[in-house]
Image (cartoon, helix red, strand yellow):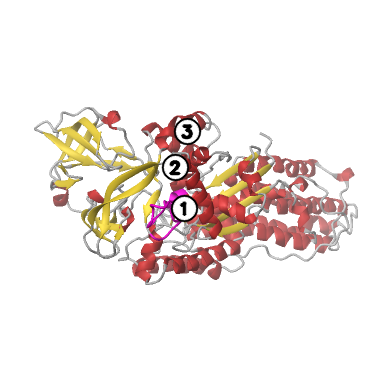
């Protein structure tokens, strides 16, 4: 489609902490690269983002720090906004969901769906803190994880082992607000019937996006749709958030994942009076940049809400990245195992482009990748300093030394194959880089830019104008050879400034200064041209584009990480899964156990005879399992991953000697073992071959 305008969004960072480099690598750097490229193409583009300021973790942090939720979000909104600005993330607007315009826009969406009769009103029993007189969302409930024994597991997930939980599964659950034991109390909420949009989502995504969306995005969406969609509550009991705009909804707010994506719309409204052109016209290309933990919300839930409302464009693409680990371990905000952006800027002033470069070359575009300080140093010293920096510096130094500081002419009569080949490489580079950028292959695009620089270095080394200069006194015509070499190298440098600008904007500006050209030269239409610098034009003396990083600097950063880890070893992780790219779902290894610990578990092969949903519990299935010597009832938190009819007859591994406990009034005798993949999908741990029910697992 011939799109007339582009709307690019980056996931709203959660305002209960600063941003780290995993956030940058996940979505903010890729989105900025893409937008800078579109702007250089002179396309009509708006780049919107803002702080996500509602939700349970913010209220918990406020409670722990003895301040108000508004004070929490004010603090981190300003810190996050400043970090983005310093890193050159060029939003057209960085808004916040506590703004009045966002509350009004979110409430309008809710009212629109409510007036159409789309919501299902449901009463259910939920945990209630009598001391604080509030209903407790899953994240407000803390207890011991039944899987790994973590005493600080949340009611929706254990941050230590990654298990998906429900409050009923916790051992000795208590309120995170008062530490008291909660009671059950009836409350009412409004559910969006996601199941009614399942066939439409199947047609739009499963059939329509198979060849255009990244495999990790498409695969996760298909898995959710294939597993069957269920109605989801769009309201919560809380006093912090967007109030539900109904007369009988006091003390209730919109679910954070209902209002947060609408923040893109409200931010666009805040940015321009023509906001509807970018959201409501079919010739707009909407692209969401997110981390992989936000895929379902941006690809399934938010589009279904837009469809239900009507009149809005849907995302043309959602190029989500995977996670970036640090020094071989997943990022952990609680343990302070992270490289914080604001700290990096203090420790490495005026080196934003080095971090942008390393994060892009090592971007987790197709799989989780690892950031290490030694790799950071090696890439800077070996690729930026020794490759691009060295090439540009030599070209400028030799131009000043051998050509009187001016762009020398090109002499076609003495051009050779090396000259013509490099000129063609300059012209072709634009096409290759452009194709990669259009297809969100930013790592490949940056490689091609650096490859052009490498070719320039190789060309100069083969031409050796400094050697040719020694014979110019005897052979004046050799000056033409020098002129040709440096003319081509300077035109290549001009092209590098254009091609590198989406990735390293601070470096591109420095190159423009050295070449004494205005920023307009960075327009994409100029890429591939070999006459950008006019003959006899005086250029400034060279400045070093990059500096070397010393081993001691790297050692300091690694030691800082280790010191933070030691200092925060006993702190419970309060990071939310609502933070883009905050935590991988693959857990770290647990503490070492002995063989005596292991043999205490009685693991048995079992066969699921029947499965049914537990009433008023979205996550629970009641399973009847044949263990050979008896039939057992086991309650398992897998309802969001499997339909009951899909798993009847499935062989599973059961912890048969786990003490019985009641969940939703049902006595559960045992636990089935599940693995969790990087996307959070639960997978049965089953025998490869059929085993007789009751067979011991050793």
Marks 3/1 in contact by CB < 8 Å: the verdict is: no
Task: Return the residue found at the far front.
Answer: 247
Going by the image, does 74 lie left or right of 577? right
Residue 262 position in % (x across, y down): 52, 49
Q: Mark 3 or mark 1, which is nearer to you? A: 3
Disc number lying in front (2 or 1):
2
- Viewer-proximal residue among 9 and 187: 187
The image's mark for residue 191 is none
Residue 231 lies left or right of residue 210; in this view the side is left
Task: Report which residue position mark 2 lands on.
Answer: 296
Q: Residue at x 50, y 60 (%)?
A: 98
Q: How packed is label 1: few (under 14 Cα within 10 Å), some, or many (20 or more)?
A: many
**Precedes in sequence: disc 3 or disc 2:** 3
342 is within the stretch colored magenta: no
Mark 3 or 1, nearer chain start: 3
Whether residue 22 appears in this view of the structure is yes
Q: Quadrant of residue 573?
A: bottom left
Mark pair 2, 1: CA separation? 12 Å
Q: Which residue is mark 3?
A: 201
Q: Residue at x 48, y 46 (%)?
A: 111
**Above or below, comparing residue 184 to residue 344 in the picture:** above
Q: Which residues are magenta?
A: 239-258
Q: Quadrant of the C terminus?
A: top left
The one of 356 and 180 positioned closer to us in this rendering: 180
- State the quadrant of the N terminus: top right
Helix, strand or loop at mark 3: helix
The residue tagged 1 is: 580
Q: Nearer the viewer, mark 3 or mark 2?
A: 3
Camera-side residue of 255 and 224: 255
């Amino acid at each position: 489609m011939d799109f007339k305008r582009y709307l690019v969004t980056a996931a709203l960072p959660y305002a209960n902490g600063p941003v780290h480099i995993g956030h940058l690598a996940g979505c903010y750097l890729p989105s900025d690269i893409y937008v800078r490229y579109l702007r250089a193409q002179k396309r009509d583009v708006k780049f919107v983002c803002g702080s996500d300021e509602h939700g349970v973790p913010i209220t918990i942090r406020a409670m722990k720090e003895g301040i108000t939720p508004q004070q929490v979000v004010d603090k981190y909104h300003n810190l996050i906004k400043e970090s983005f600005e310093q890193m050159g993330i060029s939003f057209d607007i960085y808004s916040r969901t506590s703004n009045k315009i966002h509350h009004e826009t979110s409430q309008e969406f809710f009212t629109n769906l409510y007036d159409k009769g789309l919501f299902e009103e449901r009463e259910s029993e939920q945990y209630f803190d009598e001391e604080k007189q509030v209903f407790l969302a899953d994240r407000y409930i803390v207890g011991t994880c039944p899987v790994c024994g973590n005493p600080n597991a949340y009611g929706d997930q254990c941050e230590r082992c990654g298990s998906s939980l429900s409050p009923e599964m916790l051992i000795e659950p208590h309120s995170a607000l008062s530490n008291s034991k909660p009671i059950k109390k009836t409350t009412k909420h409004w559910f969006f019937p996601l199941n009614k949009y399942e066939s439409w989502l199947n047609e739009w995504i499963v059939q329509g996006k198979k060849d255009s969306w990244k495999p990790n995005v498409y695969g996760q969406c298909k898995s959710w749709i294939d597993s069957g969609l269920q109605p989801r509550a769009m309201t919560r009991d809380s006093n912090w958030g967007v109030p539900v705009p109904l007369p009988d909804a006091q003390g209730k707010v919109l679910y954070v994942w209902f209002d947060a994506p609408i923040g893109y719309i409200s931010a666009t409204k805040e940015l321009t009076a023509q906001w509807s052109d970018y959201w409501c016209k079919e010739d707009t290309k909407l692209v969401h940049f997110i981390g992989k933990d936000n895929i379902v919300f941006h690809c399934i839930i938010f589009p279904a809400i837009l469809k239900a409302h009507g009149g809005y464009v849907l995302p043309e693409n959602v190029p989500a990245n995977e996670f970036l680990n640090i020094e071989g371990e997943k990022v952990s905000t609680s343990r302070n195992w992270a490289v914080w952006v604001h700290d990096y800027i203090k420790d490495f002033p005026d080196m934003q482009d080095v971090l942008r470069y390393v994060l892009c070359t090592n971007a987790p575009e197709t799989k989780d990748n690892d950031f290490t300080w030694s790799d950071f140093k090696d890439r800077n010293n070996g690729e930026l300093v020794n490759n691009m920096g060295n090439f540009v510096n030599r070209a400028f130094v030799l131009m000043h030394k051998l050509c009187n500081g001016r762009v020398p002419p090109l002499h076609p009569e003495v051009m050779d194959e090396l000259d013509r080949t490099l000129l063609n490489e300059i012209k072709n580079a634009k096409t290759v880089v452009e194709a990669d950028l259009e297809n969100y292959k930013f790592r490949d695009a940056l490689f091609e830019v650096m490859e052009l620089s490498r070719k320039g270095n190789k060309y100069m080394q083969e031409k050796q104008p400094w050697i040719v200069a020694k014979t110019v006194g005897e052979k004046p015509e050799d000056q033409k050879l020098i002129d040709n070499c440096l003319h081509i190298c300077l035109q290549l440098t001009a092209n590098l400034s254009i091609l590198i600008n989406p990735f390293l904007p601070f470096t591109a500006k420095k190159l423009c200064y050295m070449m004494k050209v205005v920023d307009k030269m960075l327009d994409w239409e100029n890429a591939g041209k070999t006459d950008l610098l006019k003959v006899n034009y005086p250029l400034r003396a060279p400045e070093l584009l990059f500096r070397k990083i010393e081993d001691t600097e790297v050692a300091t950063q690694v030691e800082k990480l280790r010191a933070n880890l030691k200092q925060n070893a006993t702190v419970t992780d309060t990071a939310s899964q609502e933070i883009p790219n905050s935590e991988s779902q693959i857990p770290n290894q647990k503490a070492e156990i002995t063989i005596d610990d292991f043999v205490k578990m009685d693991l048995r092969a079992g066969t699921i005879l029947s499965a049914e949903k537990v009433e008023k519990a979205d996550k629970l299935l009641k399973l009847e399992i044949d263990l050979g010597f008896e039939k057992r009832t086991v309650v398992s938190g897998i309802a969001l991953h499997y339909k009951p009819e899909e798993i009847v007859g499935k062989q599973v591994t059961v912890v048969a000697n786990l003490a019985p406990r009641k969940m939703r009034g049902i006595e559960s005798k045992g636990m089935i073992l599940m693995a969790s993949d990087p996307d959070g999908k639960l997978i049965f741990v089953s025998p490869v071959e059929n085993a007789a029910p009751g067979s011991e697992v050793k």
